[in-house]
Amino acid sequence: MMAIGIGGFMAYTSSEASFVSFSLIIFIACNALEGPTMGLLSKVIPKTLANGILNAGLLATEAGTLGRVVGDFWLTAAAHGGIDNLVDALFGPLILLVAASVVITLWSYSRLQPRYDDEDDD
């Protein structure tokens, strides 16, 4: 859905209705992906980092914050190139990153699944 929203946004931004529609698709897809992404991130963090102050929740939160910082810098750099090229500068690389993320996730999905042989049995 994210790739569809980005592709539509880049191709059909001539009207306000298409701008709002594709922006909503992108926004909803981003928010829907954040939960599973943080869940997977917490599963692959080593158990030795799950204790103390630097636990998996804090590390997952910090990874999300780092992503927002990178996004802010990306937006600033794209706007520095001029408003005329803003959409292409933002969403051109983004659609490539989304496609690469899907390919990498599909390639490594079997290693991302949680192991049930852990000693955490409640």
Image (cartoon, rainbow, N blue to C red):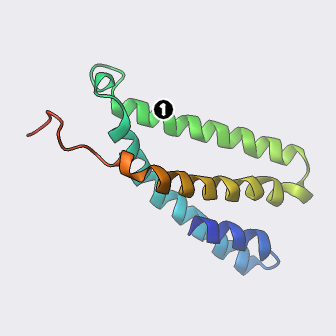
Which is more toward the observer, 53 or 115?
Answer: 115
Residue at 60% x, 41% y is 68
Under mark 1, the amino acid is Glu
Could you say where residue 108 lies in the image, as x and y percent from the top left?
45, 49
Q: Place residue 4 in its image quadrant.
A: bottom right
Report the side of 116 relative to 49 (left or right). left
Residue at 74% x, 58% y is 91
Q: In which quarter of the image is the N terminus?
A: bottom right
Could you say where residue 10 lies in the image, as x and y percent from the top left?
77, 68
Report the side of 111 relative to 100 (left or right). left
Residue 75 in the image: above or below residue 70: below
Which is more toward the observer, 72 or 112?
Answer: 112
Q: Residue furthest left?
A: 122
Q: Place residue 17 in its image quadrant.
A: bottom right
Q: Residue furthest top?
A: 52
Residue at 36% x, 22% y is 54
Q: How crowded is mark 1: few (under 14 residues within 10 Å), some or many (20 or more)?
A: few
Residue at 17% x, 39% y is 117
Q: Quadrant of the C terminus?
A: top left
Could you say where residue 58 lies in the image, as x and y percent from the top left?
39, 30
Q: How many marks?
A: 1
Element type at mark 1 = helix
Residue at the spot of label 1: 62
Residue 24 in the image: above or below residue 59: below
Report the side of 76 relative to 82 (left or right). left
Residue 64 in the image: above or below residue 37: above
Could you say where residue 44 lies in the image, as x and y percent from the top left?
37, 38
